[in-house]
Image (tube, rainbow, N blue to C red):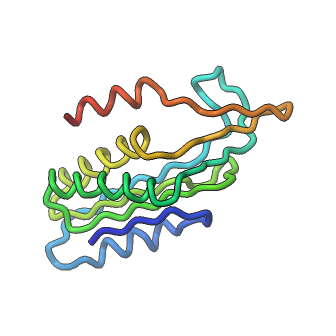
Amino acid sequence: MKYLAIQTVAFDVGEETTQLQALGPELGAVASFVGQMRNSNTDEGREAVIAMTLEHYPGMAEKAIGKIIDKAFERWPLLGVRVIHRVGRLLPGDPIVYVGVASSHRTEAFQACEFIMDFLKTAAPFWKKEELAGKRERWVEARESDTSKLGEWK
């Protein structure tokens, strides 16, 4: 089972996890990750972030994320994956992304969840603009630490 959504509305973590837990008797593990918007950018000296707007190119983003999910299914014996990524204007504390992975064993579920999230963070076509105090704005650049993490999966 593969599920992918890009949406403006918040998601229900419990409901998303319940969908994975219902996959059948061979299910042994569900691993999930929820990313939330912080109120500061730690790479910029803890500068206050008031809001963030996430943009995407419809069609392109879904295709790129679909390929990431397919790669996870090729690498591990998975029973299901659910990925939800929000776009639009978000406030500190708002959930941004949900990645849930179901497998017969925990190791595969953990590894696939981390793999998908690492690729989402760097390879999915999303653009982030932060709103800062004083009515300033800036586009968020990719972090070198996120990009270098991908090398571990090659």
Q: Is residue 51 above or below residue 134?
A: below
Residue at image position (69%, 53%) is: 89
Residue at image position (34%, 26%) is: 148
The location of residue 132, given as percent across then percent down, is 76, 34
Q: Quadrant of residue 150?
A: top left
Looking at the image, how many numbered discs can be counted on the residues?
Answer: 0
Residue that extends furthest to the top in the rendered view of this protein = 45
Q: Say which of 94 and 61 sits in front.
A: 61
Residue at image position (61%, 63%) is: 8
Q: Is residue 54 above or below residue 138?
A: below
Q: Quadrant of residue 134?
A: top right
Q: Say which of 102 and 29 sits in front.
A: 102
Residue that extends furthest to the right in the rendered view of this protein = 134
Q: Say which of 38 and 85 sits in front.
A: 85
The location of residue 63, given as percent across then percent down, is 37, 57
Q: Is residue 34 above or below residue 4?
A: above
Q: Quadrant of residue 7?
A: bottom right
Which quadrant is home to the C terminus?
A: top left
The location of residue 152, given as percent across then percent down, is 24, 31
Which quadrant is home to the N terminus?
A: bottom left
Residue at image position (62%, 30%) is: 41
